[in-house]
Image (cartoon, rainbow, N blue to C red):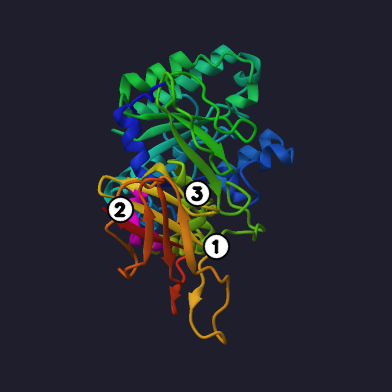
Amino acid sequence: MAVPQPEPRIARFEKLAYGIFIHWGLYSLLGQGEWAQFIKKIPKAEYMKLKDRFTAEEFDGRETARIARRAGMKYAVLTTRHHDGFSLYDTCGLNDYDAVHSPAGRDLVAEFVEGCRQEGIIPFFYHTTLDWYQESFEQDFDAYLEYLRQSVELLCRNYGDIGGLWFDGNWSKAEADWKEDELYGTIRRYQPEAMIINNTGLSARGEAGHPELDSVTFEQGRPSPIDREGAGKYLAAEMCQTMNTHWGIGSLDFKYMSPAEIIGNLCACRKVGANYLLNVGPTASGRIPDYETAALTRAGDWVRLHEKVLYGGKPCSVAGQGGDFALETDDGIYLFISNLAISGNENVTIGPSGDGPRAFSGLQRKVSSVRWLDNDEPLLYTQDTDSGLFALHATGFPYGSNLVIRVAEADF
């Protein structure tokens, strides 16, 4: 069975490869994660008082986008409204539970979009479908869905072209009729080239949904390969993940990813052709914290060394062993090698003894040369084109370096 061709917006999305997720709202004032209202059973009236302290005095849309660009990211997804029902955008009279009616006194989504455009980052909008603030969510679901549709229409009409809408919450009423035709139809009317994504949550990673959706999601879990043979539509894939263990800032959450872990997760996504959407939780005042900024920037140094293949490479028939894998571009095959050692004196080098031969299968094109991308060092290799077997001698990292995952380019 044939694999369908991706629609242009989906093909463009796959080439974005790497994005920043930004969870920021009233819950950030508590510093206890984005579900604090629900999990800690904070009364609604008490929680709503947080709006009176929401100043956003350190939020800078351009600086946020600049951090993403330095990290090697191509798109940004902002929580325009999360489950607590508070909106970072001007709701234009739908209610006054928004940033414009808080001490911030301004449309923060507009600032986010402008900052993204200044730095060449594609803006996407996260929007909840679950709502703890709007009483109609429980009392008159049809009325709530119209409120939701009108909210999304504002986002589609008021901020120019956007990369897409990223929804989350349908899993809260799995058996309900969410009237997705009307919601997605509104988006297509105003933003025909926007990606439409609806998160299937922790319990349904990789599951497809409504025909208008453009990507499957893998929340907090490495993506698996997508079988597209015979599918009615080509769907992209995206893993979303937190840098620590909360989406919104957790003041006492110290379990953060290292740059090495970020690199490993990005590669695991690209191995199967999926995008990687990595989350940060800004402070109550809207600043991305120092550790996240530093870790993203350091991982971004690695991305810049490999940007050609990370953005343009696709999964192919060439398979490695263990953590090794290959991606293909129009002009070559790139071999991703993990668990390498540092070449150096035994008294100062530590880590795995991973230099030596690495085998791949499925490579039947005649290879003319192989070299490391980071320093152009040529590598020894042997090949049997009839069987597709290929092996290279992977030298260790030069002393003074450790790229976590090293990439070799095979030319033909």
Of label 3 and label 1, which has the lower sequence position? 1
- The answer to whether residue 93 is visible is no
Q: For numbered disc 1, what is the local secondary structure?
A: loop
Q: For numbered disc 3, what is the local secondary structure?
A: helix
The mark found on residue 343 in the picture is none
* Corner quadrant of residue 153: top left
- Out of 148 and 255, give the one closest to the viewer: 255
Q: Nearer the viewer, mark 1 or mark 2?
A: 2
Residue 168: percent from left, percent from top: 54, 31
Q: Which residue is mark 1?
A: 258
Callout 2 crowding tier (Cα within 10 Å): few <14, some 14–19, many ≥20? few
The amino acid type found where label 3 is placed reads Ala
Q: For numbered disc 2, what is the local secondary structure?
A: helix
The answer to whether residue 46 is magenta is no
Q: Which residue is mark 2?
A: 308
- Out of 314 and 84, give the one closest to the viewer: 314
Q: Which residue is mark 3?
A: 268
> Image point 62% across, 48% down: which residue?
246
The amino acid type found where label 1 is placed reads Ser
